[in-house]
Structure formats: structure tokens, C-alpha cells
Image (cartoon, coloured by chain):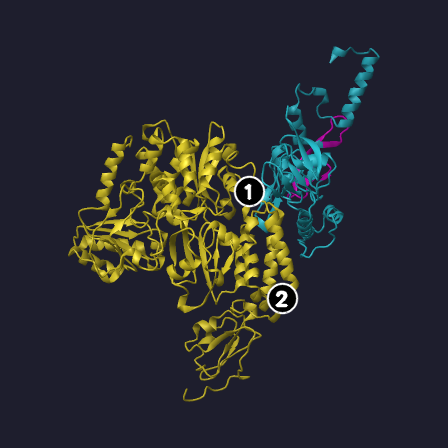
Chain colours: A yellow, B cyan
Amino acid sequence: MKIKTLQDLENVRKAGIKKLFPDKPRIAVGLATCGIAAGGQDVYEALETALKKKGVNAFLTKTGCFGICNEEPLVNIAMPGKPLVILHKVQKEDAESIAEKVAKGKLPEEKALCKIEEWDHITSEKPFFYGKGYENIPLWNEIPYFKPQKKVVLRDAGIINPEDIEEYIAVGGYSAVYKALTKMTPDEVVEEVKKSGLRGRGGAGFPTGLKWEFTKKEKSDVKYVICNADEGDPGAYMNRNEMESDPHMVIEGMIIGAYAIGASEGFIYVRAEYPLAIERLKLAIKQAKEYGLLGEHIFGTEFSFDIRIATGAGAFVCGEETALIASIEGKPGRPRPRPPFPAQKGLWEKPTNINNVETWCNIAPIIKKGGEWFSRIGIERNTGTKVFSLVGKVNKVGLVEVPLGTTINEIVCHIGGCGIKSKEIKAVQTGGPSGGCIPRNLFDTPIDYDHLKEVGSIMGSGGLVVMDEDTCMVDTAKYFLSFTVDESCGKCVPCREGLKRMYDILEKITDGRGTEEDLGILDELAHTIKATSLCGLGQTAPNPVITTIKYFKDEYMEHIKNKVCPARVCRALIDYFIVPDKCKGCTICAKNCPVGAIDGGPGLIHIIDQSKCIACGTCMDVCPFDAVVKLSGEKIDTPDKPIPVKKGR
Amino acid sequence: MKKTVRIKINGKTYEAEEGESILSVCNRENIDIPNLCFNEALAPYGACRLCMVEVVNGPGKKGMTTSCTLEAVEGLEVVTDTEQIVKYRNVLFELYLAQAPNSEEIKEMAAKYGVTKTRFAKKAKPLDPLGNKCVLCGQCVRVCDEIMGTAAINYIGRGFHTKINTPYLEKNDACMGCGACAEVCPTGAIQMEDIYDKRIMKSWSGTEVKLKKCKSCGRYFAPEPIAEFAYAKLDPEIKEELKDLCPDCRRKLLSRKEILISQGEVSKNED
């Protein structure tokens, strides 16, 4: 059906509510890419079979990701009138027992992670009330992972079915479009976004309302809006999840933006490596067209707008807006100098407004609740929330949405639960390959655009990679540079030539051939590249090196002066030894050594021939007695040749 | 007509056309700024990063930027050689010296600004069709596309491994052999040679272009596609008798006619 009036929207909303609150148990399996990777699809199929077999009258459906990736696969169950319960680490083997319990009106409480009694979708008129009960299950916002979080962008993720527009409308979806189109002028929409203080979530933090105003002011018969979904930072997957879990919120934001600036067509530029996101976006666009929310005369107004999807072909630099535009136009993805900015000359030379996925996701709540409401979240000049993907050497990984201004410590230690196996956390890398490494002693830094810049990093799109005592900071800098060297488009000389030279120097240092002079050259190159590169990629690529030199110079010096890698990561600087007292002569290490560097035999103490050893670490991995040690700059006494293991050990 | 604006370069006031590139103004006024990728005939590209200037005043953003992409506006004030610019430019020259170690032009330009050595390992690919002289300024690619409309060559790969050549490193029929690429190349990297009836684009995967034979003297004088390209563009059309003549024979023919006319042996309207 085509939605033309508020009443039409209301009718669809009611149909959607029936799906969210059916008069039977609703079981939703988390099927974003993370859930599927953890086995969610198998769980879904097993549940389908089990429910059918046992003749259970329940509504089985899919949902997006609720954010706590450690605990995947997640399944949520809502009994009529009872709290929504989130089950974690559900395996397909659990399907039968879940079905059995549901049939009896019970819950598999032993699998419960938390419950939701009331949920605010923000765009709905009032919060949804599920019910009270299950005293033994903690409330979702009582568990440490969620306690400091505030879900604005992820308001629907993991609750509604991302493949059903009716469920999106049920939680107030597209009512912001209705409000904007029928009750607000384009100027008022821009004004509202300006009032909210929303800044671009792609990383640079440019005020969104101002950007819209620039494009709005341009006079042109055709204008475009673009959603930048070319997320490519290593360890960052916020945008993927936003698109997979709630694609309609992206579309809704774009419709409102297009109305505000006067655009008639939109593009979502999404990387081809995100097939599920593309599939769900395509479906969402199709549904929105069917319901008349995209196309001619939306809500019966004069405003018409349509969205197409453009897929990227694997170039990181296409996340840069001018390269992205070139790519949509079918040209090689190479940035061009700005000005002219896309707001003046963008796609096919027409005024174009580009925003990141997450920026678009914030628009509907701003229009629905007002810019004033939004500006109260977060801190001054950094309003609203930000979704981070917390990954690396931290206990709990996943998507974390917190108000801007939350400290690193809060995210890494309280939400993330600190280091794995109680290892000491050393640093956190924010902003992907363009960001910097922030050391532990600066963890009270609030995460927002300005404070991160002060400590030499950037917000970026929201990747937070945690590093612990086993991470070598020189190696980390080298890793990020290898990424930017690979992804540099090759247009301008500092980025193309300079980054490779920096990488070569870092390789020299991790190989134990570095000199103090190299550090100076590294610094000189880093600042030249930052100052002279054409686009954001080159201008920020040296950040991981600059910050690691600034905060972890002692590690560099250990590599250079003492030829020691304190974290024992750099292969050229580490040696493996077999501790004679611990070796039981089982021969497993010798059998597995790929280069035959281990001498020994049954019942003999094994010895590694250092001249043959390639430091691959296989012996350490396979030794059942923890007899292999990894050292850098140290040695232990070992026999000259294999001698019998002492009896009685 | 375009508006004239007043801008300041190194403290001195100059007049410029509004929107004109600052590098153009500097070239005209003999203010020395090194550059490799700039060409008045082509759209500004901003890739070589050598023409950095510092914007100290004006309506736009302050700070360092490339003068080739910086447009003249009323009140703009730039400085061309701050300590910072010199420092960064010297590092860029070192990168160029390592990237194109065989280019005399690069050595000369770098030396002019006091850079004679590089701390970086020199690239030396033994079979480089561009003789380890290319700095990827892209003038050849752009002239072939923007001016000739041919796009016979383009970038291959990306980042440090970018190179310029024909698609799939195969001989390219699209090439008209005009040689504009070699003409604009600032480092003398592009090699071509005329052998008997062919022009060989040595740097472009050995692409061969047939040469046109002069119907009078019999010498090969221009690439066939270029001659046809030029004839097609002429309006009014080229006279049949002038077609396929080399420049020398064409001149001879025209001179002879002029003489005959002046001697009254033929009337002006006869042809």
C-alpha cells in the first residue's frame, strides 16, 4: 500500500505493533553479520525445525545485533506481557530445549543474559512497555557492559526485524519524515539540525547543519545527497551493523536531508565487502518505494526523492568524499583538491551533500524530538552519542554507544571489562589508520572530537582497538602504515612515496637494524606528509607513528639501542628456548618445527638451534608442558646437545 | 569579461583575473615556484605538491596549500617561501630524487633549491619503460584525455606501485601517436621514435602508429591518425590538393601558386 496520510502511517504502525507484540511468544534471532558468523543462522534454522516439530505456537523472526558481540549468538524472547529476555551464547543444540520451554510458557533462564522491561525507541510517541517479571534476570542496563551506554543510533538494533518496514514504522519510523515534509520548511529542518549540534560521524566532525546549509544555498536544478558507507578502518564495523540492523533509519535520514537541501536523488555508497548490508538496504529501499516513502510525491507533498545504491570495489580511499564521487561517476577513485567542495561541485558537477551512515542515523531522532533534546546528550560542542566498535585485547568486544565525552577508561575498563586474562592494557588506538595510539595514563581523556585531537589522535569513524602488554607499539605503527601504503591511491607524492619510505624505516627498526638517526627521518617524513598531502588519507596516515613515538619512545629506543622488543613481537628480535628443567622429551616440538631447528629425541632434552630458528612460535604453541619460552635480548642456559631428561620428573 | 582582483604575493600587490590560479599569476610575474604537474592547458591537478604557498590572509582557509589549485580572489595574500615550505619542499625533492633517479630534469630542479642528495633508496627498475624517470605527475595522462580526447594511457595500480602505461601493457590502437605526452612530460621520461613508416611509442608498450607518406616527395611526415584528426577538424575543409602533403611540399605548392598569381599566369579564383 502507498502511505499518503498520517492515518495511512498509523494503520501500518498498528500492523507493525502486532508483529512486535504478537499474542504469542516472539522469538528473534540476532542475524547481523556478527550473529551469523557466530552460528546464528544455524540457531535460527534449528529453532524453526524444533518449533514446528513440537507444534509450538510462536512467532520466529530475525533481528539485528544488540551490540554485545562476545555473547553471540543472541536470541531474544518476549512472552506476551512479560519482559523481553535476551539469551546469549545460544547454540543450535539448545533449540529443542528452548522450544520445549516456550511451549510451556517458560523461559530457558540459564541462557538469559538480561531482560528489557521498557524500551525507548526514541522515535516512538512513548517508550514501549514489555512487562515485569523474571526476578533472577538482571535488567539490561544493570549489567556493566550496557550500564554507561545510551542507545540513540542503535535504538532499534537487535529488537526489530530489519527486513520488515512495518516493524520500523511500528517504533515510530518515518514519522520524522512526515513531520519534516508536512509541518516544517526546509529551512526549519536545517535549523533544527544546526540546533542539535550534530557533527559529522565520519570522523572529521564538521557540523552537519552547516554542511546542509551550504548545499541548500547553492542554486542548481539538480542536487544530490550521498550516504558514505565505505567503512574501511581495520577493526571498525559500526556502520555495517547500523545498516544491517536498521537500514530504514539511514533511508529516513536521507529523505529528510534531501528535503532540507532540495535534492531529488540520493546514493548510498557502500563497500562491496558488506553483502548483507547491501542486501538489506536494497530490500529496505524496495519496501520504502512500495509504501510510497520513496518516489514521487512523498506523503502526498510536492517532494519526490529516490535512492540508488553504488558499490565500492575495495579501495579505502573511496571513503574520502571527492574520491567517492569520482567512483560513483565511474572514474578511478582518486581524490581531487578542495575547494570546490562537493556542496558546490559534487556528483556530476552538481551540489552534493555527503554524510556518513551514522550521521544520517541521527537525523530522525533530531527531527522527532528536536535539536534541543539532542544537544542535551553529550557535552558542549560534542553533542549526541557515538557508536564505537570496541575490539582488540579487551574482555568484552562489541558495539558500544555512549554519549560523547565519555572517558576512554569508562569504555575500555568499565564497558569492556579491561584486559584479557588480566593482562595490563597499554594503549588504545582510535580512529583507525588515521588515528593515534593513546597510552594508558591518558585514559581519563574524554572521547570527543576536540579532546582526541589534543592528544594527537582523531575520532575517526569509531574504531577502538585495545592493546595490551603483548602488543609492540613499533609493530603496531608498522601495521597501520602497511595498511595506508596499500591503500594510498598514488596521486600525490608525499602519501605515495613518503609513506612507503616511513614503512621501510619502521621495518628496519623492527628488524633490529634501526638507528637513532632513523627516528629523526621518520619524524621529518611524518610531518611533511601530514602537511603536504592532498587528501585526508595522507594528512592523517602518519598519526599512528607520530603518537607511538610521542608516547612510547622507550619502546622504539629498546628496538634501536638494545635490539630488544619488549613485547616480544618483532620476530627478528626474539629467540625461543626450551627450558631444560621443563622439557620431558616428548619430541612434539621437533616434529612440528617447520625448519628442523630442534634437536632431540624421545626422553632427551630438546634444544633449539638458534641459527636455524625462524621464530615462528610453533614449538611454543604445541608444547604440552609450557617448556618453551620466548625472550628478547635474554638467554637461558641450555645443554650443548640433547641429554637425557632427569628421571623422576 | 572576468573581474580583475588585487592579490598580494610576498608582500607585493599584483592584479589577477578572478579565479585565476595563483601559480599562473606567479609564472607571469616571474615569481619562482617549483612545480611538476601544472600545465596552463590542463585542469589544475594538485598532485606534485611542490607549489605549496602559505595563505596568510583572505576570505578562505589560511595555511599551506598548493598554488596551482588556489584561486585568485580579492584580498588574498600569500607567501611563497616560508621556512616551513622550504623544509617540507626539500623532503619532497628527496622523495623525487629517489623515485626518478635517472631524470636530469629532477636533479636540476632539486639542485636549484639546494637539494642534491636523497636519504632514501633510489628506485631502479631495470626494465622500466619510463627509464626510472617518471614522477607520476600525470600530465601525459591528462593531455591525452583532456586535450586529445584519446585516453590511450592511464594509471595502473595504486599507491607506491602506481605506473602509467597502456591498458594491460598491450599495444594500444587508440593512440594517435601525436606525442603530446612526450611533449608535456617534465622529466623527459617518455620515449618515442619514428622508424621508416611507423612511429613507435617505446614507453607505451611498443604501440605503433602508421606514418603518412607525402604524396609529393614521398617522405613520411606525420602519424596517419593525427593527419586525419586534423583534416576532420578544419573548417572550411582542406583542399584536396593540399591533403597528404608534408609541410615542406605544402609550402612549396602554395608559394608556387602565389608566384603564378602574381605573374598573372593564373587567376585567383581558378582554384
Sort mark 1 into few (<14), some (14-19) or many (20+) by Cα contacts within 10 Å: many
Residue A235 seen in this snapshot: no
Is B137 rendered above or below residue A189? below
Q: Earlier in the sequence, mark 1 or mark 2?
A: 1
Q: Secondary structure at mark 1?
A: loop
- B3 left or right, relative to A481: right
In the picture of the structure, the residue carrying the numbered disc 2 is A513
Mark seen at residue A335: 1
How many numbered discs, if any?
2
Q: Nearer the viewer, residue A157 or B207?
A: A157
State the quadrant of the C terminus of chain B.
top right
Percent position of residue B146, x then y: 61, 34
Q: Secondary structure at mark 2?
A: loop
Q: Write down the quadrant of residue A53 in the picture.
A: bottom left
Q: Is residue A237 left or right of residue A65?
A: right
Q: What is the x, y in percent for residue A422?
A: 41, 69
